[in-house]
């Protein structure tokens, strides 16, 4: 759980509420975009430099893709249905609102398209992975690895400022209170159901499918834990499946935000909604969803090792 992120964001919220002028809002947006691109590039370099990354993709890519797609889809659908009923208007989080760059989101664009931010994210990710694969021990990869944490802190402070400048947000959260827990509930249940459905297609038993899906996007923990508890094959499949979930969420969040709602975007990100995929939540949803995204990430991250142990322990 990332308590440092929560603390930094809280400080930013106080600053945004009491000290930051309204004129800073567009500057805040541009700085968030810059930090997001740097983080995605650093994440790609880290992924590409993982030992055996290319070999793992070749060996277990198909099974991992199924274990990524089905749990993610089930989570998104379940969270969408739950929040539509329990958290009010399903489009209230994003439809018809204005982004920080002034462009409309939600239902304003009837067709799916990759806008500038998503395209930049894709390019940065591809460049980062290529760099990590080609030169895993290069100084640039090492620098990117060291920079990712402070850049994330800066981004979270900027997010906090944006949240603090959003008047009426706390009242909205108090209005929904305990109902916000339906988001992590839907993420967990949907992921487990997806793991059950995926298992027979890839030659796993039900408990193994559930265990791999229980990573909720936290690929490093899921891979290591399942490798030690079950074996290298399931560990490798779980690692890739949850890595794919993290990467895929970057590029499906814009579509989900336009066609479903902001809460369903959180379901796609799962445990990563508190850190690595949070920049896309910031970009494509509103401040309320960003706060819910942090809450969901904390809860899901805490549940990952418990769920994996319960499934195969």
Image (cartoon, rainbow, N blue to C red):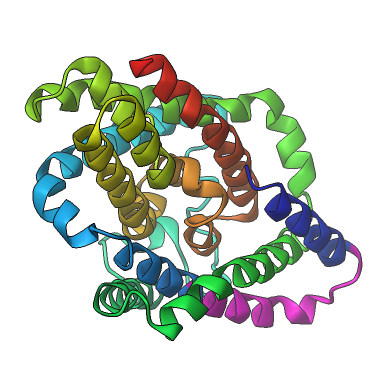
Q: Is residue 225 left or right of residue 96?
A: left
Q: Is residue 233 above or below residue 110?
A: above
**Is residue 58 rendered magenta in the image?**
no
**What residue is shown at x 10% (from left), y 45% (from top)?**
62
The one of 288 and 48 positioned closer to us in this rendering: 48
What x and y, as percent, mark residue 259? 34, 49
Which region of the structure is painted magenta? 18-36
Q: Is residue 190 above or below residue 110?
A: above
Q: Residue furthest right?
A: 18
| Res 264 seen here | no
The one of 308 and 232 positioned closer to us in this rendering: 232
Which quarter of the rendered picture does the C terminus lie within? top left
What x and y, as percent, mark residue 35? 56, 75
**What residue is shown at x 25% (from left), y 30% (from top)?**
231
Q: Is residue 139 left or right of residue 255?
A: right
The one of 204 and 97 positioned closer to us in this rendering: 204
Please, what is the dominant secondary structure of the magenta stretch? helix
- Which quadrant holds residue 253? bottom left
Which quarter of the rendered picture does the N terminus lie within? top right
What x and y, as percent, mark residue 150? 65, 71
| Res 53 seen here | yes
**Is residue 31 rendered magenta in the image?**
yes
């Amino acid at each position: 759980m990332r308590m440092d992120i929560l603390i930094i964001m809280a400080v930013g919220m106080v600053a945004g509420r009491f000290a930051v002028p309204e004129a800073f809002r567009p500057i805040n947006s541009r700085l968030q975009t810059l930090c997001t691109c740097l983080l995605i590039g650093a994440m790609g370099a880290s992924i590409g430099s993982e030992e055996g990354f290319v070999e793992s993709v070749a060996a277990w890519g198909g099974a991992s893709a199924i274990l990524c797609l089905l749990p993610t889809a089930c989570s998104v659908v379940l969270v969408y249905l739950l929040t539509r009923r329990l958290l009010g208007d399903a489009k209230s989080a994003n439809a018809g609102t204005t982004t920080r760059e002034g462009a409309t989101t939600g239902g304003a664009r009837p067709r799916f398209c990759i806008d500038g931010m998503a395209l930049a994210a894709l390019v940065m990710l591809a460049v980062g992975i290529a760099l990590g694969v080609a030169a895993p021990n290069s100084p640039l990869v090492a620098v990117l690895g060291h920079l990712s944490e402070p850049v994330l802190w800066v981004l979270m402070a900027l997010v906090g400022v944006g949240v603090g400048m959003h008047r009426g947000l706390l009242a909205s959260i108090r209005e929904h209170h305990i109902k916000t827990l339906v988001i992590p509930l839907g993420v967990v249940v949907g992921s487990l159901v997806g793991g059950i459905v995926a298992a027979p297609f890839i030659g796993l038993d039900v408990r193994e499918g559930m265990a791999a899906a229980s990573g909720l996007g936290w690929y490093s923990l899921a891979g290591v834990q399942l490798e030690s508890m079950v074996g290298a094959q399931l560990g490798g499949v779980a690692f890739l499946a949850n890595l794919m979930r993290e990467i895929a969420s970057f590029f499906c969040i814009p579509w989900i935000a336009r066609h479903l709602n902001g809460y369903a975007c959180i379901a796609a990100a799962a445990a990563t909604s508190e850190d690595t995929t949070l920049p896309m939540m910031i970009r494509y949803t509103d401040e309320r969803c960003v706060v819910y995204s942090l809450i969901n990430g904390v809860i899901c991250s805490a549940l990952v090792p418990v769920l994996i142990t319960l499934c195969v322990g």
